[in-house]
Image (cartoon, rainbow, N blue to C red):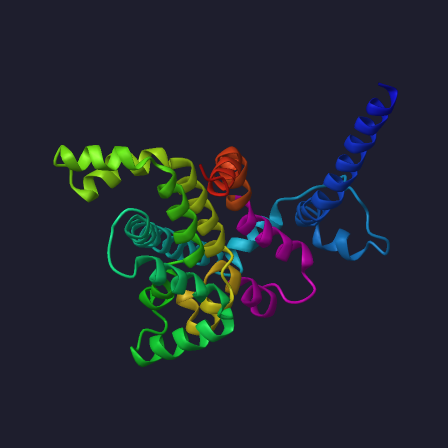
């Protein structure tokens, strides 16, 4: 009994220490963002607190550079990409899980093999295609290469496969179409996984850097991830770290709030996707 209690204490102490290590960069980011520029530069030894916090850095983040436009562009990109991707992966997962056609299993195996292709090769191919279609510096060019995902199709297909075949056959006997069965039965049952995929895709789009950096050189189409570099070089300069941290806090806040609101759905959706039977 005593050994078990000591083990529990040690486990919680270790988890607490690890949580502090993980959360410290976020604390330091927020702390730096509320420090006055002069006070920050006067600190020869960094201080872990401030007695005179200021919100001026946040005001500068929206007035010195076009942070509001970057946020709006990222929101449009994220919503458009996520909505189109959900339609594509849902129909693809349903076809692989329920429809019977020649070579289905072989096609799905080859489809999964695409996950073995390095992302760099895919980026090069997509860049060439979008450039040839003259879609650079457009939201269409930003969105199109990201409207599907082999992993998300696989994850959703495994969830669809867990639904008993008897439900599908009974629905077909009643004259229900495949799309109606998908909409009325399969999607509500697999809602946790769909929520998880949606949230993960939103996070992925919000943090996208390589593809937007390649396909856009017009500031009117910059996303927040690309805008950070523009903020650093052309906005606040290399020395104004507090203002830069304020911009990063504004950019990171939506994702933090999203995760806190839907953390249970994320965990349950991933767990459900990894369980069969």
Nearer the observer, 254 or 198: 198
Nearer the observer, 76 or 4: 4
Residue with the most extreme left position: 175
* Residue 81 as seen in the image, left or right of residue 120: left
Residue stretch rendered in magenta on the structure? 227-253
Nearer the observer, 162 or 71: 162
Q: Give the vertical position of 238 relative to 271 (above or below).
A: below
Q: Can residue 61 be seen here?
A: yes
Residue with the most extreme top position: 1
* Residue 176 as seen in the image, left or right of residue 72: left
Q: Quadrant of the C terminus?
A: top left
Q: Quadrant of the N terminus?
A: top right
x and y, in percent, of residue 91 in the image: 28, 51
Number of residue marks: 0
x and y, in percent, of residue 15 in the image: 75, 36
Q: Can residue 216 be seen here?
A: no
Queried whether the magenta region covers residue 249, the answer comes back as yes
Seen at 43% across and 61% down, the residue is: 112
Predominant secondary structure, magenta span: helix
Examine the image and state in which quarter residue 233 appears.
Answer: bottom right
Nearer the observer, 225 or 80: 80
x and y, in percent, of residue 24 in the image: 73, 45
Q: Give the vertical position of 224 relative to 131 (above or below).
A: above
Queried whether the magenta region covers residue 37, the answer comes back as no
x and y, in percent, of residue 193 in the image: 42, 40
Seen at 47% across and 75% down, the residue is: 121
């Amino acid at each position: 009994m005593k050994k078990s209690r000591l083990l529990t204490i040690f486990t919680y102490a270790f988890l607490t220490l690890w949580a502090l290590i993980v959360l410290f960069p976020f604390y330091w980011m927020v702390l730096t963002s509320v420090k006055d520029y002069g006070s920050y530069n006067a600190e020869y030894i960094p201080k872990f607190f401030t007695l005179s916090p200021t919100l001026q850095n946040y005001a500068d983040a929206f007035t010195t550079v076009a942070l509001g436009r970057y946020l709006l562009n990222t929101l449009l990109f994220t919503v458009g990409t996520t909505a189109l991707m959900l339609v594509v992966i849902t129909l693809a997962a349903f076809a692989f899980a329920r429809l019977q056609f020649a070579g289905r299993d072989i096609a799905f195996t080859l489809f999964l093999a695409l996950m073995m292709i390095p992302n760099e090769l895919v980026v090069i191919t997509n860049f060439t295609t979008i450039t040839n279609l003259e879609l650079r510096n457009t939201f269409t060019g930003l969105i199109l290469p990201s409207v599907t995902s082999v992993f998300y199709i696989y994850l959703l297909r495994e969830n669809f496969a867990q639904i008993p075949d008897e439900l599908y056959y009974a629905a077909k006997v009643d004259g229900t179409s495949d799309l109606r069965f998908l909409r009325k039965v399969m999607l509500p049952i697999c809602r946790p996984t769909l929520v998880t995929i949606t949230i993960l895709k939103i996070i992925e789009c919000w943090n996208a850097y390589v593809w937007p950096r390649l396909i856009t050189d017009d500031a009117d189409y910059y996303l927040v991830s690309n805008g950070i570099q523009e903020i650093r070089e052309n906005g606040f300069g290399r020395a104004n770290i507090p203002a830069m941290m304020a911009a990063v806090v504004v950019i990171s806040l939506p994702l933090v709030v999203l995760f806190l609101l839907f953390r249970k759905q994320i965990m349950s959706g991933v767990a459900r996707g990894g369980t069969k039977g």
